[in-house]
């Protein structure tokens, strides 16, 4: 989430920055989309399409009970 606060990034770029696989990053992105905190779109890339992500929120507050 912190990577996407000020800019949009594609799955490949996020995975590289997080030192994770693209498959793992994609799975985590899907979870955050379902939670309603990320938005994604597909656009043409060098080798097909790429998924570009951006945040839908600026702040997340967790209440731990």
Image (spheres, rainbow, N blue to C red):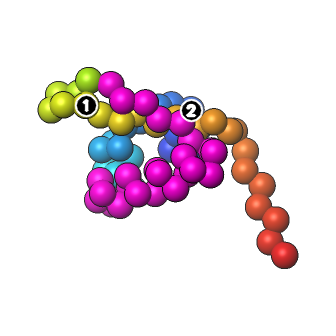
Residue 17: tell me if it is visible.
no
Residue found at the very far front of the displayed protein: 34
Crowdedness near tag 1: few (<14), some (14–19) or many (≥20) residues, C-alpha within 10 Å: few
Q: Which residues are magenta?
A: 19-43
Q: Nearer the viewer, mark 2 or mark 1?
A: 1
Q: Residue furthest left?
A: 47
Asked if one can make out residue 3 in the rendered structure from this viewpoint, the answer is yes
SS label for mark 2:
loop
Residue 55 location, x and y as percent? 58, 38
Disc assigned to residue 6: 2
Local crowd at mark 2 within 10 Å, few (<14), some, or many (≥20)? few
Q: Is residue 39 magenta?
A: yes
Location of mark 1 (residue): 49
Please tell me whether residue 27 belongs to the stretch shown in magenta: yes
- From the viewer's perspective, is 63 left or right of 10? right
- Residue 5, quarter of picture: top right
Q: Between 17 and 30, which is closer to the camera in this rendering?
A: 30
Q: Is residue 16 above or below residue 65?
A: above
**What's the mark number on residue 40?**
none
Q: Residue furthest bottom?
A: 65
* Viewer-closest of 25 and 17: 25
All told, the count of numbered labels is: 2
- Residue at image point 82% right, 65% down: 63
Residue name at image x 15 percent, y 32 percent? 47
Quadrant of the rendering where the C terminus is positioned:
bottom right
Q: Position of residue 43 (x, y in %)?
A: 33, 25
Q: Please report whichever mark, 2 or 1, sits nearer to the chain's N-terminal start.
A: 2
Give the Cα separation between the discs numbered 2 and 1: 23 Å
Q: Position of residue 59 (x, y in %)?
A: 73, 45
Residue plotted at (68% across, 39% down): 57
Give above or below for 32 relative to 58: below
Q: From the top left corner, tell me how far across and down residue 12 is, in percent.
A: 30, 44
């Amino acid at each position: 989430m912190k990577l996407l606060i000020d800019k949009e990034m594609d799955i490949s770029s996020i995975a590289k920055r997080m030192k994770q696989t693209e498959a793992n990053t994609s799975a985590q992105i899907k979870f955050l989309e379902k939670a309603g905190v990320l938005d994604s779109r597909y656009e043409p890339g060098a080798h097909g399409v790429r998924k570009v992500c951006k945040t839908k929120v600026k702040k997340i507050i967790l209440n731990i009970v």
